[in-house]
Image: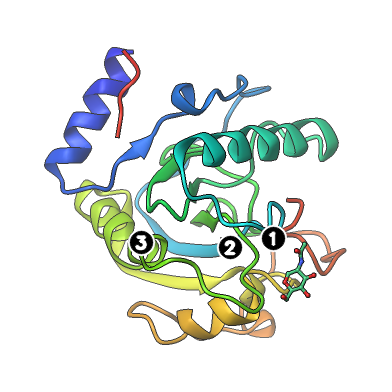
Amino acid sequence: SFSHCLFFCVALLLGCPAIHPRCRWGAAPYQGRPTPLQLPLGFLYVHHTYVPAPPCTDFARCAANMRSMQRYHQDTRGWEDIGYSFVVGSDGYVYEGRGWHWVGAHTLGHNSRGFGVAIVGNYTAALPTEAALRTVRDTLPTCAVRAGFLRPDYALLGHRQLVRTDCPGDALFHLLRTWPHFTAVSLRSLPYHGPPPLSLHKCHKVPVPCL
Ligand SMILES: *[C@@H]1O[C@H](CO)[C@@H](O)[C@H](O)[C@H]1NC(C)=O
């Protein structure tokens, strides 16, 4: 659509990574009425998908993973859409989930305060590719700050800092702790706005315009 193309072109001008829009990966429609985010947000939450466990290394595989996660989130979890704001593949590309403008379902109790970005894979014992890491560490947040979606002083957190979960995996979480913007918080030090965490695997539950 024109608006997708416009966004894509503006994103390129802002030095953003290529984001595959929903139409490109074959998203099903959003079910229900999305809640708008109040931008800019102050948090970026990092997740691993855990399932699918293998990193996706090409568009076909990453797009198929997006469709299967969306199906799982909508049909099994009963959510309105894929939970994540964005998903990053080991090809270094970004796949649009709920995007910059709509509240996601990724970080229970904190969804309206931050973007949830997941890297496809299980990073308990292994690390994502450098391409995927660079996207989450540098290019995606830099672009989001320039575009006014993310505060320049944003805090980067692992999912496990806010919800009782292993996500984003030990290996990835230990690396996150060395990144700029990483912020040490503990479950106890933040106000908690949701129902009690139920599971150790919340995460598990989980550059081309479309013309
Ligand atoms: C994730 O990786 C850990 C460590 O290698 C392994 O024990 C676990 O079974 C993996 N889970 C999945 C779903 O692949």
The image's mark for residue 188 is: none
Q: Which residue is mark 3?
A: 131
Instruction: Judge by depth and name the residue closer to the eye, 154 or 173.
Output: 173
> Label 3: few (<14), some or many (≥20) within 10 Å?
some
Instruction: Decide: is 203 above or below 176.
Output: above
Residue at disc 2, CB closer than 8 Å to ligand 1: no
- The N terminus sits in image quarter: top left
Q: Position of residue 120 (x, y in %)?
A: 57, 54
> Label 2: few (<14), some or many (≥20) within 10 Å?
many
Residue type for callout 2: His
Residue type for callout 1: Tyr
Instruction: Decide: is 196 above or below 28.
Output: below
Q: Secondary structure at mark 2?
A: strand
Residue depth check, mark 1 versus mark 3: number of the one nearer the observer: 3
Q: Which residue is mark 1?
A: 50
Residue at disc 1, CB closer than 8 Å to ligand 1: yes
- In the image, is 38 to the left or to the right of 198? left
Residue depth check, mark 3 versus mark 2: number of the one nearer the observer: 3
Instruction: Judge by depth and name the residue closer to the eye, 46 or 152.
Output: 46
Instruction: Judge by depth and name the residue closer to the eye, 109 or 52.
Output: 52
Colouring style: rainbow
Quarter of the figure with residue 123: bottom right
